[in-house]
Amino acid sequence: MALLHRATLSPTKLELMTDWLPRQDWWAGGPIGRVASYRFDDPDGEVGVETTLTRGGDAVYQVPQTYRAAPLPDAERWLVGTSEHSVLGKRWIYDAAGDPVYAAALARAVRTGEGQAREYFEENGVREYRPSSLEIAVGEPGTALPSDVDGVTLVVDGLELLVVRRLDPAGALSGAVLTGTWTGQEEPVALVYGRRL
């Protein structure tokens, strides 16, 4: 489960993405807006792991990010930026493709079918659950990764995962190990392709 805080971020996640996304070679441009998101649990409870789907023009992009209380060693190239969290203090926000906590969470989801974290707020000892804006589903890893997909490949414990950056609602789902649906997109879309090594 993912404990959320009723807090402010300065700059906000969207403000950081507005600066970071245009510098990525897979970004095609357009006004930036949030579509939906999902989270994974960090078993140690130290790192926030959130994937946001972001609209840019006519396309939807997948932006996985991790939030840390201290810099991730040797990960400067993956740093999106820093933000001041009104409850937790300074946060270092990374493109999750460079964070081993994200890679492990993604591999765990693909291997075990473990779903996304259930998000909640806690006030006066009472939990208030937030409805998910994106539902994920896990299938079996395929035998090959597509070669025509904008993404980043991660290798984790004998599993090769291709995290799709620019989503294709009409794309083939063959070999897709992780799909998502959200309001306005009821047909599953491939988020991650995978194969066993």
Image: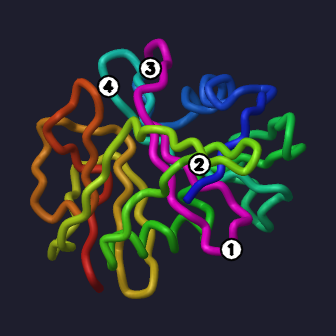
Residue at far right of view: 89
State the residue at coordinates (73%, 65%): 46
164 drawn magenta = no
> Considering the numbered disc 4 on the image, is that residue within a helix, a strand or a loop?
strand
Alpha carbon separation for disc pair 3 and 2: 20 Å
- Residue type at numbered disc 4: Ala
Q: Is residue 10 left or right of residue 63?
A: right
Q: Which residues are magenta?
A: 30-52
User: Closer to the camera, 25 or 128?
Assistant: 128
Of 142 and 107, nearer the camera is: 107
Tally of numbered tags: 4
N-term mark: 2 or 1: 1
| Disc nearest the viewer among 4 and 3 | 4
The residue singled out by tag 1 in the image is 44
Q: Is residue 41 magenta?
A: yes
72 versus 30 height, above or below? below
- The one nearer the camera, 97 or 38, is 38
Spatial CA span between label 4 and label 2: 19 Å
Asked if one can make out residue 176 in the rendered structure from this viewpoint, the answer is yes
- Residue at image mark 2: 65
For mark 3, what is the residue? 29
Q: Earlier in the sequence, mark 3 or mark 1?
A: 3
